């Protein structure tokens, strides 16, 4: 039987769509993976926003855990993988709750990603200005 294993995000390439006021020190992508629940990635205003992950090895993605700041959660997000032509295709769609608790989003079936980028695209933020704030971000694979 397969078990969930957390993917070490320090061993991936990570990109984000934007950072509030371009203040990478306080709100940048490194805060997604620093293990500190006191720091966060805070996007600029506008929708959509995204996080792009490129694993350095083949993974079998099966779930994602996110802790949004209440009031700054996405109403909807889509997990997408990049095709050979550079476009992104939807793997799964989720509708987070608007609170500050950790939420786990399980894919219907594990999705194999072999060293190509995949993206979480956040739509329709609960924030009036479209900002997304994330304190905890983890991805898991089957092993």
Image (spheres, helix red, strand yellow):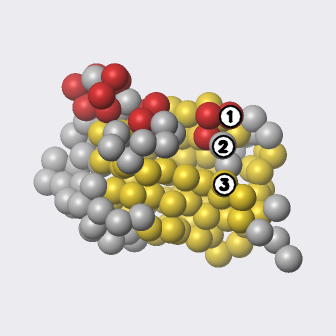
Judging from the image, what secondary structure is the residue with disc 3 in?
A: strand
Residue at 55% x, 33% y: name it. 14
Q: For marks 3 and 1, give the CA distance.
A: 12 Å
Q: Mark 2 points at which residue?
A: 8
**Disc sitting over residue 6 in the figure:** 3
Q: Can residue 125 be seen in this view?
A: no
Q: For marks 1 and 2, give the CA distance.
A: 6 Å
The quarter of the image holding the C terminus is bottom right
Q: Name the residue under label 1.
A: 11
Residue at 18% x, 55% y: name it. 127
Q: Can residue 23 be seen in this view?
A: yes
Mark sitting earlier along the chain (3/1): 3
Position of residue 15 relative to residue 71, above or below, is: above
Judging from the image, what secondary structure is the residue with disc 2 in?
A: loop
**Disc sitting over residue 45 in the figure:** none
Judging from the image, what secondary structure is the residue with disc 1 in?
A: helix
**Image-based side of 29 in relation to 64, left or right:** left
Q: Which one is nearer the viewer's eye here, 58 or 81?
A: 58
Q: How far from the left and from the top, in percent, is residue 138?
A: 55, 52
**Image-based side of 88 in relation to 43, left or right:** right
């Amino acid at each position: 039987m397969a078990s969930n294993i957390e993917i070490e995000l320090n061993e991936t390439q990570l990109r984000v769509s934007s950072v509030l006021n371009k203040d990478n020190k306080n709100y940048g992508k490194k805060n997604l993976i620093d293990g500190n629940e006191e720091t966060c990635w805070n996007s600029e205003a506008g929708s959509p926003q995204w996080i792009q992950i490129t694993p350095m090895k083949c993974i079998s993605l099966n779930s994602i855990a996110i802790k949004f700041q209440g009031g700054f959660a996405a109403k909807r997000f889509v997990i997408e993988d990049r095709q050979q032509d550079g476009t992104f295709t939807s793997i799964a769609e989720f509708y987070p709750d608007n609170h500050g608790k950790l939420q786990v989003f399980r894919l219907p079936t594990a999705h194999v990603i072999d060293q190509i980028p995949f993206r979480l695209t956040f739509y329709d933020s609960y924030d009036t200005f479209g900002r997304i704030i994330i304190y905890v971000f983890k991805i898991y694979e089957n092993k």
